[in-house]
Image: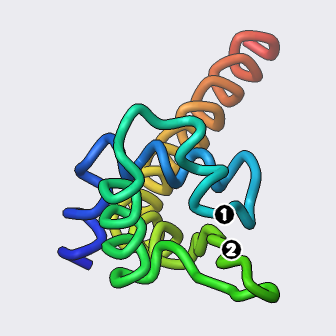
């Protein structure tokens, strides 16, 4: 998971993932059109993203297509983010129950 965090720390790699999220299955040339960097730099970023399993390469004839693999990001969400969300949702549910209880007491009292 450390390697995934390191990969996501770079804004250029996040931009590549955003581009694949918007339009999955792009070639290197298509991705380079949207970035202000050399083809070699984009290739290096894509290789790193592939190494940490954030993208998957599929050959379609002579074309090398790049696809977003959301599984590592989902694993980060499950491990680091969802537990905080759960706590907040529990707190909001409790607040709602407390407020509804006070409203009923006010109406009956």
- The residue to which callout 1 is attached is 27
Quadrant housing the C terminus:
top right
Q: Horizontal placement of 67 versus 13: left or right?
A: right
Residue 102: % across, % down: 63, 21
Q: Position of residue 47 (x, y in %)?
A: 37, 75
Crowdedness of circle 1 by 10 Å Cα count: few (<14), some, many (20+)? some
The local secondary structure at tag 2 comes to strand
Above or below, 48 relative to 100: below
| SS under mark 1 | loop
Relative to the observer, which residue lies in front, 108 or 73? Answer: 73
For the N terminus, which image quadrant?
bottom left
Looking at the picture, tell me which residue is in the foreground, 67 or 92: 67
Picture coordinates of residue 99, whole percent (x, y): 62, 24
Give the residue drawn at x 53%, y 74%: 55
Image mark for residue 65: 2
Count of number-bearing discs: 2
Q: Which mark is residue 68?
A: none
Crowding at dot 2, Cα within 10 Å, few <14 / some 14-19 / many 20+, comes out as some
Q: Is residue 108 left or right of residue 5?
A: right
- Residue at left offset 46%, top offset 43%: 15
Q: Between 76 and 55, which is closer to the camera in this rendering?
A: 55
In primary-sequence order, the first of circles 1 and 2 is 1
- Say above or below: 24 vs 4: above
Residue at 39% across, 69% down:
76
- Tell me if 53 is positioned left or right of 65 in this view: left
Dot 1 and dot 2 residues touching (CB under 8 Å): yes
Residue at 35% across / 81% down in the picture?
Answer: 52
Q: CA distance from mark 1 to mark 2?
A: 5 Å
The picture places residue 23, in percent across and down from the top left corner, at 76, 51
- Compared to residue 78, the image places residue 52 above or below, namely below
Colour style of the rendered protein structure: rainbow
């Amino acid at each position: 998971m450390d390697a995934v965090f390191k990969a996501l720390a770079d804004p250029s790699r996040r931009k590549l993932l955003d581009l694949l999220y918007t339009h999955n299955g792009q070639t290197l040339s298509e991705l380079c059109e949207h970035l202000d960097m050399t083809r070699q730099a984009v290739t290096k970023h894509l290789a790193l993203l592939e190494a940490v399993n954030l993208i998957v390469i599929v050959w379609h004839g002579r074309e090398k297509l790049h696809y977003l693999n959301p599984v590592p990001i989902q694993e980060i969400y499950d491990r680091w983010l969802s537990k905080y969300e759960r706590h907040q949702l529990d707190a909001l549910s409790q607040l709602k129950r407390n407020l509804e209880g006070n409203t009923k007491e006010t109406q009956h009292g």
